[in-house]
Image (cartoon, grey):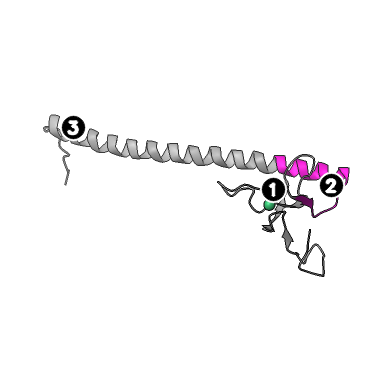
């Protein structure tokens, strides 16, 4: 593969081209085998209706076992927190719906009370 940049460090990103001469984006892997490890893949991979080549090249070296374990633990923690956040958002929506329902119920009760029990009026004592 050709690189248009001569300096090639983890900070300076060079342009990588796939077999179709399309710029291959730098993507981060989140699999358990290669958590957080970046790679270049075909730029047409996620373009619907376009045929893509099998171009693939690692950008980062293989992480050691300890780094992988830490990354996997952090990924699981992130998944867990995202799931809890979704659950909380859903509970907030349910609570808001109940709040609206109770507000309407309160108004209906008040109207029914005023219509069917007109003799019950609030007496003010001076
Ligand atoms: Zn390609």
**Residue at 78% over, 62% down:** 2
Asked whether 115 or 123 is in front, the reply is: 115
Magenta run includes residue 58: yes
| Spatial CA span between label 2 and label 3 | 67 Å
Picture coordinates of residue 25, whole percent (x, y): 69, 56
Q: Residues within 10 Å of mark 2 (few under 14, many from 20)?
A: some
- Badge 1 is on which residue? 53
Q: Secondary structure at mark 2?
A: helix
Q: Secondary structure at mark 1?
A: loop
Tell me, for residue 99, which label it has, or none.
Answer: none
Asked whether 10 or 78 is in front, the reply is: 10
| Spatial CA span between label 2 and label 1 | 31 Å
Picture coordinates of residue 120, whole percent (x, y): 15, 33
Magenta run includes residue 2: no
* Mark toward the viewer: 1 or 3: 1
Q: Is residue 17 left or right of residue 94?
A: right
Mark closer to the chain start, 1 or 3:
1
- Badge 2 is on which residue? 67
Q: Is residue 123 left or right of residue 54?
A: left
Q: Residues within 10 Å of mark 1 (few under 14, many from 20)?
A: some
- Quarter where residue 32 is shown: top right
**Residue at 16% over, 35% down:** 114
**Which quadrant of the figure contains the N terminus?**
bottom right
Asked whether 52 or 112 is in front, the reply is: 52
Q: Secondary structure at mark 3?
A: helix
- Badge 3 is on which residue? 112
Mark closer to the chain start, 2 or 3:
2
- Quarter where residue 122 is shown: top left
Does label 3 point to a residue whose CB lies under 8 Å from ligand 1? no
* Mark toward the viewer: 2 or 3: 2
Q: Which residues are magenta?
A: 56-76
Does residue 17 sit above or below 63 in this rendering? below
């Amino acid at each position: 593969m050709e690189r248009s940049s001569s300096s090639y460090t983890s900070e300076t990103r060079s342009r990588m081209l796939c077999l179709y001469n399309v710029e291959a984006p730098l993507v981060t892997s989140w699999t358990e085998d290669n958590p957080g490890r970046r790679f270049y893949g075909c730029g047409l991979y996620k373009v619907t209706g376009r045929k893509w080549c099998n171009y693939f090249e690692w950008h980062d070296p293989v992480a050691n076992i300890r780094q992988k374990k830490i990354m996997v633990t952090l990924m699981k923690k992130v998944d867990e927190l995202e799931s809890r956040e979704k659950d909380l958002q859903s509970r907030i929506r349910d609570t808001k719906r109940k709040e609206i329902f109770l507000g309407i119920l309160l108004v209906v009760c008040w109207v029914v009370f005023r219509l069917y029990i007109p003799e019950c009026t609030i007496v003010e004592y001076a």
